[in-house]
Image: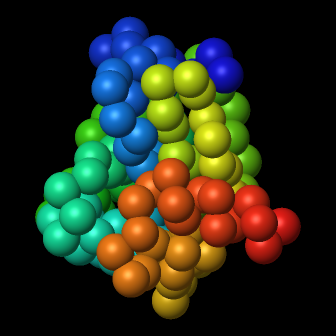
């Protein structure tokens, strides 16, 4: 995957040693996705596993104002890629070997990946459970 952050970091370099979750959302969809994003931040706090909340593109002025007003954390935005707004949010699990799980259009109140992480499963266990279930 050739996705790159605005600071030049390839998305594949975000998982340096351990698996992480990456959630990509179009800035126009942030309010619609707020519950899923909040759930991911809560899971990050409880689990100690990294979650990167990325925007699919640089927000325009109005979108940036809305993001600031909501206090929503974002960890950067992608450049050089076009992702249709309605395909977001996209949830991915990245490991040092690349993407090990990807789901698109994941709207609240939860997501299959978040559901699979219940009962204190690790990211690897959750991905394996989703693979076994055919998700």
- What residue sits 38% from the left and 10% below the top? 8
Nearer the observer, 24 or 42: 42
- What residue sits 63% from the left and 41% below the top? 100
Q: On the rendered structure, is 128 left or right of 95?
A: right
Q: Position of residue 105 (x, y in %)?
A: 68, 66
Quadrant for the N terminus, please. Answer: top right
Q: On the rendered structure, is 36 left or right of 38?
A: right
Q: Which of the 4 image quadrants contains residue 38?
A: bottom left
Question: Is residue 34 shown to the viewer in this render?
Answer: no
The relative height of residue 37 versus residue 56 in the rendered view (above or below) is below
Nearer the observer, 81 or 1: 1
Nearer the observer, 50 or 107: 50
Q: Which of the 4 image quadrants contains residue 7?
A: top left
Q: Position of residue 49 (x, y in %)?
A: 26, 52
Q: Position of residue 52 (x, y in %)?
A: 34, 45
The relative height of residue 108 versus residue 133 in the rendered view (above or below) is below
Quadrant for the C terminus, please. Answer: bottom right
Q: Residue furthest right?
A: 134
- What residue sits 72% from the left and 48% below the top? 84
- What residue sits 41% from the left and 19% below the top? 13
Q: Position of residue 89 (x, y in %)?
A: 57, 60
């Amino acid at each position: 995957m050739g996705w790159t952050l605005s600071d030049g970091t390839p998305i594949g370099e975000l998982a340096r040693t351990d698996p992480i979750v990456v959630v990509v959302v179009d800035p126009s969809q942030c309010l619609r996705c707020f519950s899923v994003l909040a759930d991911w931040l809560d899971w990050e706090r409880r689990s100690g596993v990294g979650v990167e909340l990325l925007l699919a593109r640089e927000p325009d002025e109005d979108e940036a104002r809305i993001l600031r007003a909501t206090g929503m954390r974002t960890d950067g935005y992608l450049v050089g890629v076009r992702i249709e707004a309605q395909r977001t949010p996209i949830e991915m699990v990245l490991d040092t070997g690349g993407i090990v799980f990807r789901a698109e259009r994941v709207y609240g109140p939860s997501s299959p990946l978040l559901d699979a992480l219940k009962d204190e499963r690790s990211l690897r266990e959750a991905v394996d459970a989703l693979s076994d279930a055919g998700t």
